[in-house]
Image (cartoon, rainbow, N blue to C red):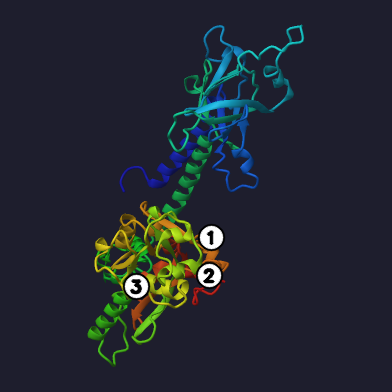
Amino acid sequence: MNGIPWDTTLAVVGLAVSALAALWEFALVGRKLLGYRVQMDTTAQDAAAAPYAGVLQQMQRNGTPLRDPSFVLLRIENSGRAPIVESDYLAPDGARAGIQVRFRGRRVVGMVVTELSRDELRGFFTPGDTGQGAPQRVRGLGVTDGLIELPKVKLNRRDHYKVLAVLEREQGYSERTFPDPEVVGGLVGGVRRGRMRRTEYHPFAARPVRALLVVLVLVLIGESLFMLLRSAPTAAPLDCAKGTLTLSGSTAFAPVLREAARQYEKTCPDAHIPVSADTFQGSVAGLNSLAAAGAKEKPAGQDQGLGDRLAFSDGPKGDGRPQLLPRPVALSLFTLVVNPDAGVKDLGLRQGRDIYAGKITNWSQVKGNDVPIHLVSRHPGSGTRTTLEQQVLGGRSLPAVTAGDCAALDDARPGRCEVGDTTTLLDTVASVPGALGHSEVGAATAHRGVQPVRIDGYPATLEGVDSGAYPYWQTEYAYTYGEPPAGSLAAGFLRSLGNEVGKDIIRSHGDRPCAELSKPLLCRPG
């Protein structure tokens, strides 16, 4: 490269970053700066899982329970290096309040100053005496509906105080969540036009300084790497292969595979892994497709396996197809799902078996709504369906289909229909009153029209599987036709599912990578 060398450029950038860090810390931040932190903003609902949280929901005022009570803890602090006095507050002449805190959608029931950095600040919040035994109101400190006013407190460097407010939902406010408190205040001649700003705790330096220091470290690392790599040859990414890889099999595991395929193509530009709506047709269909392709492309007597095809199955293949070799990939979670009209969020294991056996035909029989139960299931060959029969229904098969088209189900009578993939099943359950179906957890959770159902009180979680409390899960297997060549696209994609990026993708969809278990080759909970 002609002109200024890269190493010289990086050295100049490093010196500039150091100068900016010093200028920020000792010149800008050294001025007056009034800050605040919202250290807690929680409702009684947020704390519902905590011990004794019911006490919070029973809070009253004048004998009347508070509407959706919430609690906010604010810290007001001198974040600069110069002291703050009363005349520094940006407020009209004669005004005693220096800071206003607004709570949109909430009304202040009460508030108290809970912590002072030093006892000398107590006088700003302690009422005086009229001389007649009646205390005076603290000037500048007050509460009006959704507003708290705080006095002009003198704050030396690092001084602070905390305010705890108890609030209730304002009548007529319909938003589900409350916006953050609005803290309004300012200083004459302060940093950033004197506006009060939200701050954070910094153990040794302000965030901008830390950011500049990080940049400086990165500059130094970059300079070192530039020196080391300037003459190094360019190497291809590990496990990258050229060509086209055909995937098939489980629709439940399809979201993981789609994301993993996109990531692999991004890392390996010469690899092509086409994924469409018709790519995944079910576990058995995928295994049959792989076996047929292998028999056609690799006649008997050839030991070399296919390197351009993979099939994925919820659970082992069973008997037959001896040329298909399994590799456990993930521990997958499944869940029952219902139409919200059913009025049910939990089913006992025995109740679930009785429903699929036809002994329970209306949701009212399990304390739900008076709605007939319609079973929406996957076609035979689905791993999700097979796992349901084996691990939830105790090995029993599903009842006979009563409607060839789910749209033809009778609203007044129970029935059962079948669909071809997970997405269609979830859409059908969401549209058919009283419908009950089954799905992998990630897709069910993301679908807003269905209600996941607990089994015996246990949700579909990996912790429930580990403890043996939750039964609806299965090992996800990747199948190859024979042993694929080590440098093939199939082998490289399988290895990518076991690296850190692949494991992150698997975890993000609610499953657990087999590589994380104590016995990866078994891929069973401990």
SS under mark 1: loop
Q: Which residue is mark 2?
A: 517
Indicate the position of residue 287 as horizontal and vertical percent values.
32, 78
Mark toward the viewer: 2 or 1: 1
**Mark 2 closeness class: few <14, some 14–19, many ≥20 residues within 10 Å:** some
Indicate the position of residue 225 as horizontal and vertical percent values.
44, 54
| Residue 238, quarter of the rendered image | bottom left
| Residue type beneath disc 3 | Ser
Q: Which residue is mark 3?
A: 382
The answer, for residue 77, to whether it is visible in the render is no
**Which residue is pictured at 32% across the width and 66% down the height?**
415
- How far, Cα to Cα, is label 3 from label 1? 26 Å
| Residue 148, quarter of the rendered image | top right
**Mark 1 closeness class: few <14, some 14–19, many ≥20 residues within 10 Å:** some
**Which residue is pictured at 36% across the width and 58% down the height?**
434
Relative to 515, say whether 458 is above or below: above
| Residue type beneath disc 2 | Leu
Q: Quarter of the image containing the C terminus?
A: bottom right
- How far, Cα to Cα, is label 2 from label 1? 25 Å
Label disc, if present, on residue 457 of the rendered structure? 1
Choose the circle earlier in sequence order: 2 or 1. Answer: 1
Choose the circle earlier in sequence order: 2 or 3. Answer: 3
**Mark 3 closeness class: few <14, some 14–19, many ≥20 residues within 10 Å:** many
SS under mark 3: loop
Indicate the position of residue 456 as horizontal and vertical percent values.
53, 63
Choose the circle earlier in sequence order: 3 or 1. Answer: 3
Label disc, if present, on residue 164 of the rendered structure? none
